[in-house]
C-alpha cells in the first residue's frame, strides 16, 4: 500500500467522503488511488477557486469537511480567495496539496514554491508530511483539526514521493476537539445586564444561528425584550415559517451605528463587535457607541447552545413556551419592469420548500430577505469574507451536499465572472442549481464606494466599473458549459423562467437583464 492509498483509506475512516479537485502531475498517485479505494467521490472543478468555494458550501450544509486536492503552490494560490471566505465562515475543510517529491525539491523546478508559506495565512493548521509512513497519521490529525470548534481550515502538503512510496497503512480517526462550556462568569454578567432593564441587543453568528440556538435566543428575547440581530454576513441561517425572525445588521457603517446607538449592552454569541467593512475618511470604524458595554457570552470555540440555555435558565425563561414565528405569507408574482425588487418579489412568491439560497447579489439584493421572510423553510448563505466569486462555487458544493434540495444561486454579474466555471461542474454532475444573474452590467458597489471614500469621480473610474463594453451574454456563456439558460427582460418573463427552473432537474441559469 502506498502513501496515497493510506491517505484515502484514512480520510474515509474519518468520515471524509467527498473530494473537490483540480489535480496536476504531483497528485497523480492520489488520483490513481481513487480507483482502488472505495468511498470517496471526486468532483472536478475547472479552477481552484471553484474547488475551495465548493468545499465551503458543502461544509456549511453538512457541518463536516470535504477534502480538496490542489496542485502545488500556484494551484493553492488560485483557490486562496475562497479559502479566505471559508475561514471567515468557520467552515471545516481539509486541503491536500501536492508538492514536488523531496528528492526533486532542491532543483528549483519551474513550479517550485514555498507551499507552506502560501497556505499558512489562510489555514488554521498546516503540515508537510515528511514520508509515506506518516501520511495517514497526518491526515487523521488534519481531519480532527478541521473539525475543531469552530470549523477550521487544515492544509496537508503531500510531496509526490510520500504518495508513491510504501506506507505503514491507514490509521484510526483522531478524536476531534469538543466545544468548551462557557464560563459561568460570562453567563452571570450577561444575565445581570439583561435584568437591568437597560436597552440591550444580542448579535449572533456561527453556531449561534443553528435552528435550536436561534429558538433559544428568540425565547430570551420574548422574556427580556432584548433585541436580536445577526451579523451582516453569516455563514448559514435557517429561515421561514418554522424559524424565529432575526434582524440582519446593516452593511453600511453609519446605518449600523445608528441602528444600535441606543443600546447600553451588546451581547456577542459567536460574533464580533460590529465594525465598518472599510475605513472611510471622517467616519468611525468601530460602530458601537461609547456608552455601549460589550459582553462576550460565548467565544467561537465554546458551545453556543449550552451558553444560551444556561442564560435562559439564569433569567428564568420558560422554555416550554414557543417563541413567535413569522406569519406564512408570500408576495404576489411581479409584473412590469424587471428590477431588483421585482426579482426579490418573484423569489418570495416562488421559493420552494427546503431551498438553499446562496446570496452574492451584492448591491441588487437589498429586498431579498424581506420578500422571503414569510416563505417556506429554507437556508440562506452569504459570503463571509468579502472576497467576491464565492456564490456560484458555494452553490455547487451545497448541491453536492444536499442532492434532494433545490439550490438558488443569486449572483451579481461582476462577481459571477470570477468563478463562472462552476456552471460546468453543475452540468457535469447534474446538480439542481438555479442561477440568477443580476445583470446590471457594472461593478455597481464601486460606484457607491467611490463617493463614500470621498474620491472624485472621473471618466477613468466610470470606465473601470463598467461591464457593458462589450456586454456579457450569460445565457450563451452558460449554454457553452452545458447549462440550459434564458434571458429575462420583464418581471413576467423572469417569474415564468424561475418557476420553470424549480420544476426541472439539473442546473438552469436565468440572465436577468436590469
Image: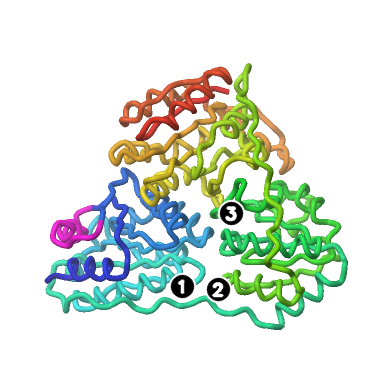
Write the start and end of the magenta stretch as one range. 24-40
What residue is shown at x 35% (from left), y 49% (from top)?
48
Residue 445 visible to the viewer: no
Q: Quadrant of residue 64?
A: bottom left
What residue is shown at x 39% (from left), y 67% (from top)?
154
Query: Upstream in the sequence, badge 2 or badge 1?
Result: 1
Query: Upstream in the sequence, badge 2 or badge 3?
Result: 3
Q: Which residue is mark 2?
A: 301
Rounded to the nearest angstrom, the CA distance separating label 2 from label 1 is: 8 Å
Q: Answer yes or no: do the residues labelled 2 and 1 have beta carbons within 8 Å?
A: yes
Q: Which residue is mark 3?
A: 234
Q: Quadrant of the C terminus?
A: top right
Q: Is residue 101 magenta?
A: no
Relative placement, left or right, of 150 versus 14 is: right
Q: Which residue is mark 1?
A: 148
Rounded to the nearest angstrom, the CA distance separating label 2 from label 3 is: 17 Å
Amino acid at each position: 500500500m502506498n502513501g496515497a492509498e493510506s491517505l484515502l483509506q484514512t480520510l474515509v475512516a474519518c468520515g471524509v467522503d467527498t473530494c473537490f479537485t483540480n489535480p496536476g502531475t504531483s497528485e497523480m498517485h492520489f488520483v490513481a488511488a481513487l480507483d482502488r479505494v472505495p468511498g470517496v467521490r471526486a468532483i472536478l472543478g475547472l479552477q481552484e477557486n471553484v474547488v475551495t468555494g465548493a468545499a465551503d458550501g458543502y461544509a456549511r450544509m453538512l457541518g463536516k469537511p470535504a477534502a480538496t486536492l490542489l496542485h502545488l503552490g500556484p494551484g493553492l494560490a488560485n483557490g486562496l480567495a475562497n479559502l479566505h471566505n471559508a475561514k471567515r465562515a468557520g467552515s471545516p475543510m481539509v486541503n491536500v496539496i501536492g508538492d514536488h517529491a523531496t528528492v526533486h525539491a532542491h532543483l528549483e523546478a519551474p513550479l517550485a514554491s514555498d507551499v507552506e508559506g502560501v497556505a499558512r495565512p489562510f489555514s488554521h493548521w498546516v503540515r508537510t508530511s515528511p514520508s509515506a509512513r506518516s501520511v495517514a497519521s497526518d491526515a487523521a490529525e488534519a481531519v480532527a483539526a478541521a473539525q475543531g470548534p469552530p470549523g477550521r481550515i487544515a492544509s496537508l502538503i503531500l510531496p509526490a514521493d510520500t504518495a508513491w512510496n510504501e506506507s505503514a497503512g491507514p490509521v484510526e480517526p483522531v478524536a476531534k476537539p469538543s466545544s468548551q462550556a462557557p464560563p459561568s462568569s460570562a453567563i452571570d454578567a450577561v444575565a445581570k445586564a439583561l435584568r437591568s432593564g437597560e436597552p440591550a441587543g444580542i448579535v449572533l453568528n456561527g453556531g449561534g444561528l443553528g435552528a435550536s440556538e436561534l429558538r433559544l435566543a428568540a425565547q430570551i428575547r420574548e422574556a427580556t425584550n432584548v433585541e436580536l440581530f445577526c451579523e451582516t454576513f453569516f455563514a448559514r441561517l435557517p429561515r421561514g415559517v418554522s424559524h424565529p425572525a432575526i434582524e440582519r445588521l446593516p452593511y453600511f457603517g453609519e446605518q449600523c451605528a445608528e441602528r444600535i446607538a441606543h443600546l447600553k449592552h451588546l451581547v456577542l454569541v459567536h460574533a464580533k463587535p460590529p465594525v465598518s467593512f472599510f475605513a472611510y475618511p471622517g467616519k468611525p470604524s468601530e460602530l458601537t457607541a461609547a456608552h455601549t458595554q460589550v459582553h462576550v457570552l460565548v467565544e467561537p470555540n465554546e458551545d453556543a447552545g449550552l451558553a444560551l440555555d444556561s442564560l435562559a435558565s439564569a433569567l428564568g425563561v420558560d422554555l416550554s413556551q414557543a417563541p413567535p414565528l413569522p406569519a406564512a405569507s408570500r408576495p404576489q408574482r411581479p409584473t412590469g419592469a424587471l428590477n431588483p425588487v421585482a426579482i426579490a418579489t418573484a423569489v418570495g412568491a416562488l421559493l420552494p420548500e427546503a431551498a438553499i439560497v446562496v446570496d452574492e447579489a451584492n448591491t441588487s439584493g437589498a429586498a431579498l430577505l424581506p420578500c422571503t421572510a414569510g416563505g417556506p423553510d429554507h437556508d440562506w448563505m452569504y459570503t463571509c469574507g468579502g472576497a467576491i466569486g464565492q456564490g456560484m462555487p458555494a452553490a455547487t458544493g451545497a448541491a453536492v451536499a444536499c442532492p434532494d434540495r433545490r439550490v438558488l444561486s443569486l449572483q451579481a454579474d461582476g462577481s459571477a465572472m470570477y468563478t463562472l466555471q462552476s456552471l460546468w461542474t453543475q452540468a457535469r454532475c447534474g446538480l439542481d442549481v438555479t442561477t440568477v444573474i443580476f445583470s446590471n452590467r457594472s461593478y455597481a458597489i464601486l460606484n457607491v464606494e467611490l463617493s463614500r471614500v470621498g474620491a472624485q469621480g472621473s471618466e477613468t473610474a466610470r470606465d473601470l466599473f463598467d461591464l457593458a463594453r462589450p456586454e456579457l451574454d450569460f445565457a450563451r456563456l452558460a449554454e457553452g458549459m452545458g447549462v440550459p439558460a434564458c434571458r429575462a427582460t420583464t418581471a413576467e418573463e423572469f417569474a415564468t423562467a424561475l418557476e420553470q427552473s424549480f420544476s426541472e432537474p439539473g442546473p438552469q441559469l436565468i440572465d436577468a437583464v436590469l
